Amino acid sequence: METNTGSVLDDPRWHTFNSQGFDCSCGERHVGLFAIHLHHPLGWQGGDDYAADTDLTLDGNFLSSNYCVLDGKFFALRARLPIQMRGAAPKSFMFTVWSSLDRMDFEAFTRDYREGTLNKNNKVRARLVNRVGGFPDSFNLMGTAFQDLDGGPPLLLVHGVQAGVNNEHPMIAEQRNGIGVDRMLELFAAYGHEMRVPVANSN
């Protein structure tokens, strides 16, 4: 558990990571934050290949890099799940995850993306439908998805499984309060990017 609650700007490792980078167990040297992408929603039983977003169909099964439909009944969007780096806003550790919407909201969001009519005030209820590594079970955490004018996937802020239940999930607190370098490295390691050994030996 991370005990340091100070700004990452006070941690020399943060500056080294963003200037020189750290060697990683994956064989690369990473300089600065990079997103962790989850391939599909939990429950997807199809193949790994993505169709084109423009081929979206609301019947049957469909998976592209941004949209998923299961049995014509389950609708999900890729969303950006930011975990802020404490004291370094707007820098965030970023996951891209999958968020389940009801059909009406899904159709409205996909239409806005297709027609380029995004509005930062457009938001809908969304449910996280991944188990995100580095956290206790996050499947079914409720949240809100916000459109972003940059055209990227919507932003997902989580706030609980349902009203009054599991509102102490650490993902909720970390989105709100931010994380430090130790926790950042722990989250990267959960996805095969182990950089903690080189960090311990860095100057």
Image (cartoon, helix red, strand yellow):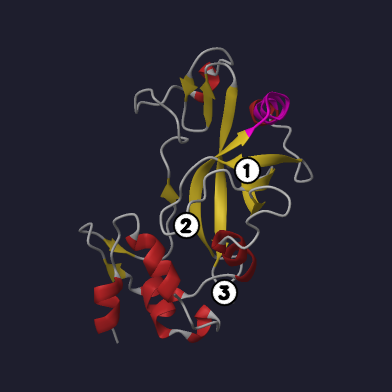
Residue 102, quarter of the rendered image: top right
Which mark is first along the chain, 1 or 2? 2
Mark 2 vs mark 1, foreground winner is: 2
Quadrant of the image for the N terminus? bottom left
Task: State the residue lying farthest toward the front.
Answer: 165
Please indicate whether residue 56 sits to the left or right of residue 40 in the image: right
Residue at (46, 58) in percent of width and height: 135
Tell whether label 3 touches label 1 (CB within 8 Å).
no
What residue sits right under mark 1 in the picture? 154
- Contact check, label 2 and label 3, Cβ < 8 Å: no
Q: Position of residue 181 (x, y in %)?
A: 44, 75
Q: Which residue is mark 2?
A: 136
Please name whichever residue, 145 or 137, is drawn nearer the observer in this view of the structure. 137
Q: Is residue 172 above or below residue 111?
A: below
Q: Amino acid at mark 3?
A: Arg
> Marks 2 and 3, Cα distance to the nearest angstrom?
21 Å
On the image, the x and y values in percent for residue 190 come to 35, 58
Check disc 2 and report its element: helix, strand or loop.
loop
Specify which label sits upstream in the sequence, 2 or 3.
3
The region drawn magenta spans 101-111
Q: Position of residue 133 (x, y in %)?
A: 41, 54
The label on residue 86 is 3
Q: Report the amino acid beneath label 1.
A: Pro
Mark 2 Cα-neighbour bin, 10 Å: few <14, some 14–19, many ≥20: few
Residue at x-position 46% and y-position 47%: 131
Along the line of sight, the residue nearer the viewer: 29 or 44: 44
Percent x, y of residue 172: 61, 60
Q: Contact, CB < 8 Å: mark 2 with mark 1?
A: no
Which secondary structure lies at badge 3? loop
Is there any visible trace of residue 151 in the rendered image?
Answer: no
Dot label at residue 84: none
